[in-house]
């Protein structure tokens, strides 16, 4: 009887020691065409050799939540495993006519608008499952708008750790400082997902805000 109790005791101890840590759910949020998928693709390609989704100049190319499981990111001798979640761009208004200027026909434009609307609803629902969120903003655009305030407000309400990426910082019109001034309570990193600029700083910050989730 005593031997059985001891065996059970050690089994519990060792199962606790060697239990797999859960993958950190890392979500990419932001307005359309800010570069969410481009950034997620670059990270996934670097560490898995595969991309997470396709990109396009046409808004709302990503219209469904996309995943990449078991992305193990290594940085400065440390590693963390993430479930990468790329979400459709969030906006307050979708009009099918906006797509016509990208040479989509009326039927295609209406379909894309409908799918994009569903994608936004799906994105907001998925917020409840996120451990950490990267908000990707276009550094050439004015950050003081309803979309960004809505996204940040939803994250604040859920107490989700946030990192803001001021993307497209390689462009002449980029203004990273304006984004820092708009959201002073969050870390902001000026990046270029297209050219991989400041990825080291990005990983440093992601590890910092994710460590208590692992």
Image (cartoon, helix red, strand yellow):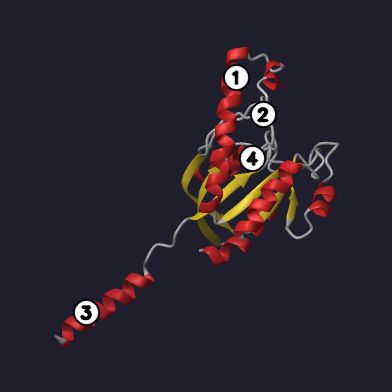
Task: Give the number of the mark in front: 4 or 1.
Answer: 1
Q: Are marks 4 and 1 in contact (CB under 8 Å)?
A: no
Task: Give the number of the mark in front: 3 or 2.
Answer: 2
* Mark 4 lies on residue: 36
* Mark 2 lies on residue: 94
Instruction: Answer few, some or many: residues within 10 Å of disc 1's Cα (few below 14, many 20 plus, some between 14 and 19).
Output: some
Q: Are marks 3 and 4 in contact (CB under 8 Å)?
A: no
Give whichever of discs 4 and 2 has the lower sequence position: 4
Q: CA distance from mark 4 to mark 2?
A: 19 Å
In the foreground, 189 or 122: 122
* Mark 3 lies on residue: 7
* Mark 1 lies on residue: 110
Q: CA distance from mark 3 to mark 2?
A: 62 Å
Which residue appears at 61% of the width and 52% of the height?
133
Give whichever of discs 2 and 1 has the lower sequence position: 2
Which residue appears at 64% of the width and 27% of the height?
56
Task: Give the number of the mark in front: 3 or 4.
Answer: 4
Q: Is residue 8 above or below residue 38?
A: below
Give whichever of discs 3 and 4 has the lower sequence position: 3
Q: CA distance from mark 4 to mark 1?
A: 23 Å
Instruction: Give left or right: position of 117 versus 12.
Output: right
Q: Are marks 3 and 2 in contact (CB under 8 Å)?
A: no
In the foreground, 100 or 202: 100
């Amino acid at each position: 009887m005593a031997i059985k109790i001891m065996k059970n005791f050690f089994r519990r101890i060792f199962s606790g020691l060697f239990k797999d840590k859960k993958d950190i759910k890392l979500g990419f949020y932001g307005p359309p065409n800010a570069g969410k998928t481009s950034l997620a693709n670059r990270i996934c390609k670097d560490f898995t050799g595969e991309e997470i989704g396709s990109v396009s100049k046409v808004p709302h190319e990503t219209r469904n939540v996309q995943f990449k499981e078991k992305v193990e990111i290594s940085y400065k001798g440390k590693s963390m495993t993430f479930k990468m979640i790329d979400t459709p761009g969030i906006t307050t208004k979708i009009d099918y006519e906006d797509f016509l200027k990208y040479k989509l026909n009326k039927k295609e434009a209406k379909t894309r608008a409908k799918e994009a609307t569903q994608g936004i609803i799906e994105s907001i629902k998925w917020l409840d499952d996120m451990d950490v969120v990267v908000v990707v903003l276009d550094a050439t655009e004015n950050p003081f708008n309803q979309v960004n305030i809505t996204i940040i407000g939803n994250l604040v309400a859920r107490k989700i750790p946030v990192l803001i990426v001021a993307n497209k910082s390689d462009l002449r019109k980029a203004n990273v400082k304006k984004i820092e001034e708009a959201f002073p309570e969050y870390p902001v990193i000026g990046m270029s997902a297209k050219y991989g600029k400041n990825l080291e700083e990005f990983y440093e910050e992601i590890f910092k805000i994710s460590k208590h989730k692992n």
